[in-house]
Image (cartoon, rainbow, N blue to C red):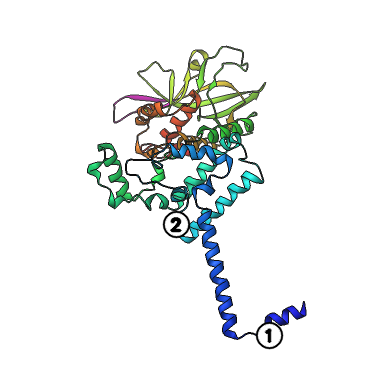
Amino acid sequence: MKKIWQFLTKPSGKYSVLALVIVGALIAIAGVVTFHASIEFTSTNEFCTSCHTMKENFNEYKNSIHYKNAAGVRAECRNCHIPENNPIDFMKAKLGGIGDIYAEFVSGTISTPEKFEDNRLRMAQDVWKMMSDTNSAPCKSCHSYTAMDHAKQSPAAAAAMTKAAAKDMNCIECHKGIAHELPNMAGGFRKTFQKMEHESVNAPDSTTLFSLVAKNLYNVDNKDSAIQGQLLPASEVKVLERKNNMLKVEITGWMEKAGRGRVMTQYMGKRVFKATVRNDVKASQKILGEETDASTGAVWQHVSVQAWITQNDMMSSIQPVWDYAKEMYGSTCNACHAAPNPAHFTANGWISGLKAMSAYYRLNKNEERTLLKYLQNHAKDTGGQGQH
């Protein structure tokens, strides 16, 4: 070891300094060329699709406009997945590819088409995040806002792209699933819901709770008794008593005086529904106050009722419900095109706004009610009042 160290540190008596410099330079050049060649090779379509689980991805890509189009311009894998304008982003993307190789051959996370499908959403979200972090630099290396001729676009596309150009929008906000199939977007938020549902089997020891799902209302502490109304998802209640796995709660809200007095809303004059009540539960109603809606002239009563509910599916905080609903909104309404910010519409406006988008998503009744409640509580005229 000592001799080796001396050889490396002492001047050579056999070779000139120039010779050593030349040899060192040649080694450096060979290293650079080899590194460059490796980067180029590992960025080719052939290499990217050499793993068998990527074969179906490649077939999806071949059926897209990025593979075959009237202009004859083809986008390769690297053009979409590797931001080449920034060396740091470039290397981060290449290192991310090593993770896919590890998942294919070592951990086996995506080693079969079935496993790949189970992880499609996670991998798609990784790509979307890269696009967001780089402001869609791979897309914009080919597509430039300044080079677009809006006269040659459809009226709808021209209107959308004009607004996008003014904000230098991230392409991925509107364009997903253009080269590969969209993943099952419901997988993420439904897993979140299952986790919350599992954690809320027993009601937390708190005097204020929030409903995770729609809950039947009873007049007595027996879930087999007659149903006398319903508490809607993401609604606040005050716990008065606990008995036989049931909760006696007080529900406070607003009812229009001229109406039939069965529907309770969260806010005066806004159709943010909190509960429906009837029979004995309705009979327990107390009037806490009365106000006139200046915009409509309608008289509203601030009221409270008492009822029994089962203790499951109740949360001590509304925030996890809003986080879940926000994830749902991003996974459904934002799946293909950019959905408006919740503050874009009023609370009442979101009813028709969400209905207009219903053809593009598949949500069950409870999911739809929760999503609507989230949007209404973060609308322009509620100012996010319901997020605390």
Neighbor class of circle 2 (other Cα within 10 Å; few <14, some 14-19, many 20+) is some
Image location of residue 260, percent across then percent down: 39, 15
Q: Which residue is mark 2?
A: 84
Q: Quadrant of residue 357?
A: top left
Figure check: 82 above or below 194: below
Which numbered mark, 1 or 2, is in the foreground of this view?
1
Q: Residue 272: horizontal and vertical position, in percent?
A: 41, 28
Q: Which is more toward the observer, 292 or 150?
A: 150
Element class at badge 2 = loop
Residue drawn at (44%, 17%) of the image: 262
Query: Which of marks 2 and 1 precedes in the sequence?
Result: 1
Identified by mark 1, the residue type is: Lys
Image quarter hosting the N terminus:
bottom right
Q: What's under tag 2, amino acid-wise?
A: Glu
- The residue most toward the left is 151
Magenta-colored span:
288-302
| Pick the front one: 344 or 109 | 109
Q: Where is residue 138 drawn, in percent x and y? A: 42, 51
Dot 1 falls on a residue whose secondary structure is loop
Please tell me how many numbered marks the rendered image carries.
Answer: 2
Q: Cα distance, mark 1 to mark 2?
A: 43 Å
Q: Which residue is mark 1?
A: 10
Residue beneath the point at 48% across and 15% down: 278
Q: Is residue 145 above or below residue 24?
A: above
Q: Residue at x 54, y 58 (%)?
A: 38
Q: Is residue 71 left or right of residue 321?
A: left
Magenta-drawn stretch contains 56? no
